[in-house]
Amino acid sequence: MDNQLEFARSVVEMAHSCGASEAEAACSISDRFSVEARAQVITKLEQSTGKTLHLRVFVDGRKATLATSDFEPSHLQAAIAQLIAGARHVAKDAYNVLPEPVAVDEAELELYSSELAARDPQVKIDEVRTLERRIREIDERIQNSNGSHVGDSITNVSLANSRGFSGEYRATRASRGSSPVATDGSDKRTGSYGTAARKLSEMESIDGVAQTAVKRTVELFGARKPPTMRVPVIFERDVAASVLSDLFAALSAGNIAIGNSWLTDRLGDQIGSSLATIIDDGRMVGALGSAPFDGEGVPTQRTTIFEAGKLRSFLFDTYYARKLGAVSTGNSTGGGVGPNNFYLKAGSQSARDLIASTKRGVFVVDTIGFATEHASGTYSRGARGFCIQNGELAYPIDEFTIASTFGDMLAGMDGVANDLRFDGAVVSPTFRVAEMTISGG
């Protein structure tokens, strides 16, 4: 596509000519590369260009959507005509409108890396083989793997609508990771670790990824089931990020609007401790969740959700903002509400400091299962980790459950580490909750 934005505008015009009152076209074209290896054997090698058009049409308060990779004009014309005919059978909804046009800040977000775009494919193939070799060199118990991978993408996003908005941006993303398999006698363990960033220079090194992946694989050998108890629980930063992912659903205006969140009607309440400051920021320079505008052309922004434990805001797209009498926070995915850079504000101490200041507790390094509920706010997950005794990781533990409520976890947050790293859309530093239930043996 020589002029992707012009194409998006032409699709909007096409929808108008077919009878749409309003229309929005979002076009994404992505060049992708991915390679996977086991030992020195390349097990997967993919290079592709993917293109997608997402179209929303509005016909007198009725909305219909189309997603297609067929950009041929005559085929599009027929599909759009059919889409608009179908829209006439959808129930009217007064909140089904496009956002009012707002100028997008021209600030440079540094989403694109020319160095990454110019990287030779052979370099990436050599890199994944190096990663596989390093995990075996670090620990002789690593005899196999579920694969190491290296990948990147260059994506162009263009969006236009019938209210006069048009914008586009280009972004890069690179990743590397490994999933070793270790054997110690009759015991077998698997683990994984990866890194991702907009620029090569911002990713963790090959050796750093290999070291962490191996550590996560072998550190739980000899794990035993802990006793049932109520103790402080420290969530390692990647596990902490999964807690925030679960929390995000309760903060989405889509769930607030239908009362499907434990936070409904609690705006302004003091819910968490003074350490619980949670932010969503789509304007962070170079971050993976950043973009100049969201999935419907609304400028992204920084939104403080919890400020020192007080609930200040939910996260909105245009539809739910209108429905709840609010303003979009620039969190539309084009079909719902999603995170930009959603994170817990870092503290000043290290994760090691948190452990050292815990006389008896549990350090969680992995969770399994999905027993969390954003309507009631209950939290329960299977977990793996370490028993903490006198400020030290005493021994590995497995086959236990951690349980509480999100409200109690936020209120009980009494320690936040400084290891925040923006390697995803939802991230967190390591944090400690003063007391949770551990269900073990």
Image (cartoon, rainbow, N blue to C red):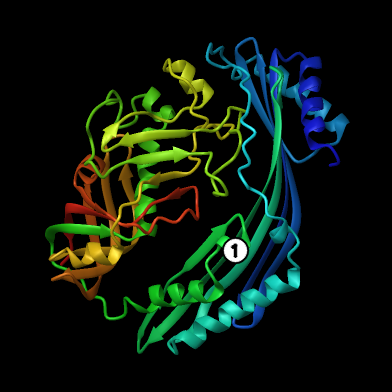
In this view of the protein, which residue sits in the foreground, 167 or 99? Answer: 167
Q: Is residue 274 above or below residue 95?
A: below
Q: Is residue 26 visible?
A: no
Q: Is residue 53 above or below residue 222?
A: above
- Identify the residue under disc 1: 201
Q: Label 1's element?
A: helix
Percent position (x, y) of residue 389?
Answer: 14, 71
Q: Residue at 58% x, 27% y: name it.
A: 298
Q: Tally the numbered discs.
A: 1
**Which image quadrant is residue 175 in?**
bottom right
Q: Quadrant of the N terminus?
A: top right
Q: Residue at 54% x, 31% y: name it.
A: 332
Q: Is residue 354 visible?
A: yes
Answer few, some or many: residues within 10 Å of disc 1's Cα (few below 14, many 20 plus, some between 14 and 19). few
In this view of the protein, which residue sits in the foreground, 92 or 305? Answer: 305
Q: Is residue 324 above or below residue 363?
A: above
Q: Residue at 57% x, 49% y: name it.
A: 286
Percent position (x, y) of residue 184?
Answer: 36, 87
Percent position (x, y) of residue 220?
Answer: 31, 76
61 left or right of 373? right
Q: Amino acid at mark 1?
A: Ser
In this view of the protein, which residue sits in the foreground, 353 or 370? Answer: 353
Q: Residue at 75% x, 56% y: name it.
A: 48
**Which image quadrant is residue 263 in?**
top left
Q: Quadrant of the C terminus?
A: bottom left
Percent position (x, y) of residue 154?
Answer: 70, 52
**Which image quadrant is residue 76 in?**
top right
156 left or right of 361? right
158 left or right of 348? right
Q: Is residue 23 above or below residue 243?
A: above
